[in-house]
Amino acid sequence: MLRPSSVNVWEVAGGVCFLLIGITVTWIGSEYPLGSLQRLGAGAFPVASGVTMAGFGIAIILAGLKAGTPPPEVSLRAFLSIPLGMLAWAVVAPRYGLIPATVCLVVICSFAQRPVRPLTMLMVAVVLSIAGTVVFLKGFGIPLAAIGR
Amino acid sequence: MELLDNLALGFEIALSFEGLLFCFIGVTIGTFVGVLPGIGALTAISMGLPLTFYLDPTLALIMLAGIFYGSQYGSSIAAILVNIPGTATAAITCLDGYPMAQQGRAGVALLITAITSYIGGTFAIIIMMIFAQSIASFGLEFGSAEYFSIMVLGLVAASTIGVGSPLKGLASVALGLTLGLVGTDVYTGQLRLTFGILELIDGVSLVALAMGLFGVAEILASVGGKHQVVVDRKSVRVRSMIPTREDIRRSVFPTIRGSLMGCWVGALPGAGPTIATFMTYAVEKRVAKDPSRFGRGAVEGIAAPEAANNAAVQAAFIPTLTLGIPGDAIMAILLGSMMIHGIAPGPLFITENADMFWGLVASFWIGNIMLLILNIPLIGIWVRLLAIPYRILYLAMLFFICIGVYSVQSSAFDVIATIVFGVVGYFMIVLQYPAAALLLGFILGPLIEEHFRRAMLLSHGEFATFVDGPISSTFLGMAALLLVLSTFRSLTRVRRRTPVKA
């Protein structure tokens, strides 16, 4: 009888996350007043949910140890470029306006896909910037400058 | 008769120019979203959320609801034509719809889908109209203990029923619940879990959470994948749509059964269109005289699930609007957006916001008719849309997400929060944790806490209050039963999976 030789690291890691979050939340929650059963304080539910999550975390770790499912694949390109692109948007938009921000977003996020096509990228950036300005800034009146503050 | 008066009021609103316009926009966006693989109804509704802040609440709801049931139509189209379900419910339609398309009967499949969906939806709307008031009156009997219990049941049901590990479902709910606790405690004013971040005083933004968890996460997971789409244009002419008499005969009872089941299951909190569709297919296969036809283009295989699907989608509005209890994540978002406007769905909603309620109901009628009529000639356009390359689409989506989230509170922090939730959501997809359960926990969590505390306050600290009343104890009992059943199910599943290799 053979045991599954690969412990699924990802699964166990997921369980560990829940466990850690649960412990943290319980700990923080216990700092708030817990109150009595009749008048539950602010800390009661955080502690309860923290304990529950920690419990689930342990169960998931145990389940992860048994299962022999193959680990999932993660796309590093998408993972780096998309958050970076969105972060750029969030930083640039309030300071320099929608159009610069959108260009940054499109350019950086385009790297998530292979191959990067500069012409398409520019076209999309232009179209989205213009459409966005018309629809969201003029149409919906969102308080954001097209260019500038 | 009071019902007719209410309907008149509702139609007055729904048939206004804006009412029709937003209904049309909603169902069109919904169909569009359903047709395209990779964007779900949940994502689309999340992206539409910021719009509710600019529109009149009733109009916004009409539109969002339109997106919801419109997406069901759209996803069936993709399922039949290219075997790619736009939503989970359409996966069942693929089973018999795609074989029908391969046999050159795509047009027939599409027409039957449209008609049975319409019948299912209509059925549910009628039920809603007839029973809404009585359900609401019943809901008035609900005290905090009862609300607590039914919400717990809803959460447990949502995480344990259906595909996937119940354990992960429950863990997701717990995480969502915890996220819902972030912010200011309503009773004591205590700041909780804010980590000194000013922007978190009012809690985590629902829009950021929804857009991140569903929009960004889906994009992260789909980018780099291959979306090759080939559609046989010839089989989609209008003339080829006419079904044979045989087809019609075979569809009648499945449609009726599907509508009933969809309505019933969809109205239960925690169970939704996905379960209704899967169950109906299984039932039809059992009941059929020749089960071997299923999976090879049996008309019953699309008629019943489609009817159930739409019936469930419409029926899901029933507990949401009459009791204030969302049945699934999408309903939870709609509920959340209503609450942001200061409108509290619940037993009093129908009477206090009669115009909104009946306006919505009337718009369901109109929306379903629009879908039925519009989709037949527009099929060609949808077919062409399926060819838009994803590598352009995802950039547009990211743009909409950024500006959408930002526009709610002019908050760049919210956009950053969206990124964080996008990453979290991505790992949830990869590790197979249901994000919808998290969202449900997030929205119901604060409500559950409120009701629990109030119940304990009123009962002077007695836990017995939750099992004293017949209603409350029934709900809790059902929740407990579901927990036991799913634990049993997953334990036996694990045991079966450890094979003995000789």
Image: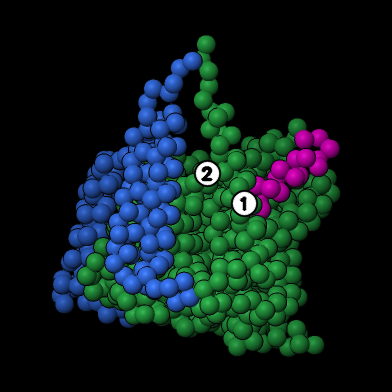
Chain colours: A blue, B green
Viewer-closest of B128 and B201? B201
Between marks 1 and 2, how big is the CA–CA gap?
A: 15 Å
- The location of residue B1, given as percent across then percent down, is 80, 88
| Residue A87 picture quarter | bottom left
Quadrant in which the C terminus of chain A is drawn: bottom left
Q: Is residue A24 left or right of residue B127?
A: left
The residue under the point 29% across, 63% down is A28
To which residue does mark 1 refer? B482
- Is residue B221 among the parts visible in the rendering? no
The residue under the point 49% across, 52% down is B170
Q: Is residue A11 above or below residue B68?
A: above
Q: Which residues are magenta?
A: B274-291
Q: Is residue B408 above or below residue B13?
A: above
Q: Which disc, if any, is residue B442? A: none
Q: Is residue B482 left or right of residue B409?
A: right
Q: Chain of mark 2?
A: B
To which residue does mark 2 refer? B164
Q: Earlier in the sequence, mark 1 or mark 2?
A: 2
- The location of residue B153, given as percent across then percent down, is 59, 60
- The location of residue B54, given as percent across then percent down, is 41, 80
Characterize the local packing of mark 2: few (<14), some (14-19) or many (20 or more) Cα atoms within 10 angstroms.
Answer: some
Characterize the local packing of mark 1: few (<14), some (14-19) or many (20 or more) Cα atoms within 10 angstroms.
Answer: some
Q: Is residue B500 left or right of residue B115?
A: left
| Residue B322 picture quarter | bottom right
The residue under the point 21% across, 54% down is A84
* B181 part of magenta stretch: no
Q: Is residue B363 left or right of residue B228?
A: right
Q: Amino acid at mark 2?
A: Gly
Front: mark 1 or 2? 1
* B283 part of magenta stretch: yes
Q: Is residue B202 above or below residue A53?
A: below
